Amino acid sequence: MSLSSSFLSGMNVVVTGASDGIGAAIAVELARSGVESLILVGRDADRLKAVAAACAVQCRCVTADLATQAGVDHLIHELDGEVVDGLVNNAGVGLGGLFEELPIATQDRMIYLNIQALTQLSHAALEPMLRRNRGFILFVGSMIGFVGGPGMSVYSGTKGFVNRFAESLRWEISGSKVRVVLLAPGVTSTSFFKSAGIAETNIRAGQMTAEEVSKAAIQGLLANRPTIIPGLRNKILLFGMRWAPRWVVGWVSRRIFAGIASRSSNSSN
Ligand SMILES: NC(=O)c1ccc[n+]([C@@H]2O[C@H](COP(=O)([O-])OP(=O)(O)OC[C@H]3O[C@@H](n4cnc5c(N)ncnc54)[C@H](OP(=O)(O)O)[C@@H]3O)[C@@H](O)[C@H]2O)c1
């Protein structure tokens, strides 16, 4: 069951990473919640079309590799002439493994997608929203961006950027009616871990579904919550992490991520 909302009513919303996982679920949830049209972005045209078919509103699919400047430019060009009322900055990838062993080019691509593309798209979308005094940007950060995760060090850094950027931008535009909202999911059952090269056996926390996360996201957006943490378990975990000394957070994090960050010739610290 979804709420049709006057806030989303008539909006044209761009969702990046809409072909799968959390992005696809958010697109479906937005369609149920009153948006007029969606622009679905990803690299896989067929999967985008399948998501469009599941959304009962007008959809336009744009293929773009947002880990490249050419892909970001292509999307911004495609959006020229569109009135973008909402932007869901969801496209993102992870990488599991030891920082010094993972190819730097692969890590650069992840940084580009998770940070550069998201920053440039937000920059292109925000000014017209502020002029119209209407719209929203929903950032998909992560719990790991608050906590940090060995074996996912650069990914954690990119999500730390998203979490802080979203919060700061919200404060920066607080005089306007444009909403900036951060969604920070915990472990969610999608293709994310497989794509990141992380085995299922290394994912210990209780997983939520993409549908549960997307419902929490749209409810949080409609309530204009600064930060949306889906699931009670994640809320409790984050509360504990915020009050615990950092060395305790580090101790817990090293145990949670031990399987990903294992080193054959390990040191004890
Ligand atoms: N799953 C989790 O546990 C979890 C937890 C916290 C935060 N998150 C965040 O949630 C977001 C969505 O992740 P997910 O779990 O839904 O993963 P997912 O199922 O793997 O989906 C990732 C989406 O990003 C798109 N994408 C990947 N590389 C891209 C590129 N170079 N250019 C354009 N689009 C690209 C993919 O589409 P194409 O393959 O068609 O390009 C896909 O639609 C990410 O930002 C992730 O960091 C996930």
Image (spheres, rainbow, N blue to C red):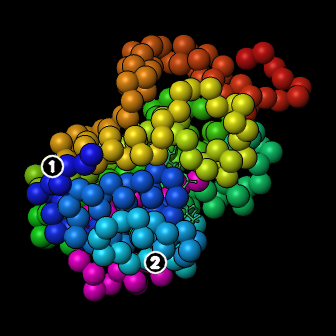
Is residue 239 one of those drawn in magenta?
Answer: no
Measured as percent of width and height from the top left, residue 156 is found at: 56, 40
Ligand 1 is found in the corner quadrant, namely: bottom right
Residue 102's place in the image compared with 20, above or below, is above
Report the residue at 40% width, 84% height from top. 77
Report the residue at 31% width, 67% height from top. 56
- Cα separation, mark 1 vs mark 2, equals 31 Å
Residue 267's place in the image compared with 227, above or below, is above
Report the residue at 61% width, 50% height from top. 191
Q: Which residue lies furthest to the right in this view?
A: 265
Is residue 162 visible in this depiction of the protein?
A: no
Q: Is residue 222 left or right of residue 242?
A: left
Is residue 86 one of those drawn in magenta?
Answer: yes
Instruction: Tell me which numbered mark, 1 or 2, is placed earlier along the sequence.
Output: 2
Q: Which three-letter amino acid code belongs to the residue tagged 1?
A: Ser
* Other-residue count near label 1 (Cα within 10 Å), few / some / many at <14 / 14–19 / ≥20: few
Q: Which three-letter amino acid code belongs to the residue tagged 2?
A: Val
Disc 2 target residue: 62
Q: Which of 82 and 201 is in front in this view?
A: 201
Disc 1 target residue: 174
Q: What stretch is highlighted in magenta?
A: 74-93
